[in-house]
Amino acid sequence: MPWESIKLNSGYYIPSIAFGTGRLGNGQGPVDQVEQALENGYNHIDTAQSYGNEGETGVALKESGLSRSDVFVTTKYSGTNGLDIPTSIKNSVNSLGVSYVDLYLVHFPRLAVPDIPTCWAQMEKVKEDGLAKSIGISSFGVQDMEILLGSAKIKPAVNQILLHPYVYQRQKPILEYAAKNGIVIEAYSALIPITKLPGGPLDKPLNEIAAKFGATTEQVLLAWTKAKGAVVVTTSSKKTRLQGYLAAGDIVLSAEDIAAIDAAGALGEKKVNMKTVLKRVVVGAIACTAVFGACNFFSISMM
C-alpha cells in the first residue's frame, strides 16, 4: 500500500499516514487503540502534550514489541499547565518511554511566548540536545511562518494544519508558502466533509469517484489529501476503517478527479462562510433584541 515516506528538510523520512490520538482520551482505551493501529500497519503515531495520553501511547509502544526505529513518534508542545518547552519535552519523552521523539511540534502559534523567534530558539535547542530528530509547527499561518523563518537557524520540518476540500482555498497560501520553503504539510481532520458536513457539494463528486474506484468516500478524501502532497493524520477505533485508510494509498486520482473535488470544495467553502455570516447576524440581532427588551422593561432610555 503506497503511503510512501516523505523526506523532510532535516534529512529524516516521515511516514505519510499517521494514527492520531487526539480524540482517544486516556485510560486503557487509547492503549488498545494505538496497539490496534500498530498491529494493522501504522508506523507513525501522532500525539500531544494536551491530549493527555502520551503515557498510554508509551505503554502501547512498549507492549507492541516493536523496536524504537520501527515507529515514527510525533508529539507536540501544548503549553499544558504553563510548562515551558525544555520541561515539556523532557516530560513527554519520559511519558512516552523513549529517549527521543521523531518529530516535536509547537501546537499553536499562540503558544509561542514571549514571541515566535524566542519560542523557536527553544525548539532548536530541543533538536540540538537530541530529544527530537525533527522539529516543526502546527496551525501556523503564512505570516507566522515568515516571522519564524526571519530568525530561524533550523527550518521547521513540517506544518500540521486543518486540511480538507472545504478549507482548501483558504489554506492554499499556507501550502504554497510551505512548498516554497521546503516545509512538509501534515493534514488533520481530512474527513470532516463526510463526518461533520455531509449533504454538501462534495457528496456528488466523492460518490461518483468512489464508485469508479470501488472505494469509499473516506478513501477518496484521503487520496485527495495525499495528492496535495500532505501527510495524513487520521484515526478510528474500527479495525476495518483503519485498514481501509491504509488501502486508500493505492488510489491514484486523475487530474479531473482532483479538479472536481477542488471545485465542489470551493463551492462548499462559500456556503459554509455564508452560513457563518448569517449565524453571526442572527446572534447579533437576538442580542440587540434582548438589550432593547431589557431597556424597555427597566425604562432605560437608549438615546
Image: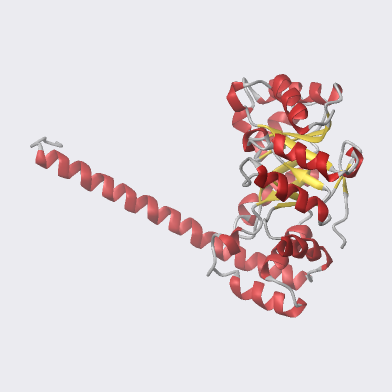
| Above or below: residue 92 compared with residue 237 | above
Q: Residue at x 62, y 20 (%)?
A: 114
- Looking at the image, which is closer to me, 158 or 281? 158
Residue 140 visible within the image: yes
Q: Specify the quadrant of the image occupied by residue 84.
A: top right
Q: Is residue 20 above or below residue 123?
A: below
Identify the image's colour scheme: rainbow, by chain, secondary structure or one colour.
Answer: secondary structure
Q: Which residue is nearer to you in this view: 286 or 277?
A: 286
Front residue of 268/251: it is 251
Q: Is residue 185 left or right of residue 100?
A: left
Q: Quadrant of the N terminus?
A: bottom right
In the image, 93: left or right of 53?
right
Q: Quadrant of residue 301?
A: top left
Relative image position of residue 74 (x, y in whole percent):
77, 39
Whole-percent x and y of residue 147? 69, 29
* Front residue of 302 and 225: 225
The C terminus, quarter of image: top left
Residue at horizontal 64 percent and vertical 44 percent from the top: 22
Question: What x and y, as percent, mark residue 45?
Answer: 77, 45
List x then y, in percent, for residue 175. 72, 48
Left of 128 or right of it: where is 55? left
Please report the residue visible at 88 percent of the width from the left and 36 percent of the height from the top.
Answer: 10
Identity of the residue drawn at 16% across and 45% down: 293
The answer to whether residue 21 is seen in the rendering is no
Q: Quadrant of residue 202?
A: bottom right
**For the image shown, how many numbered marks are present on the structure?**
0
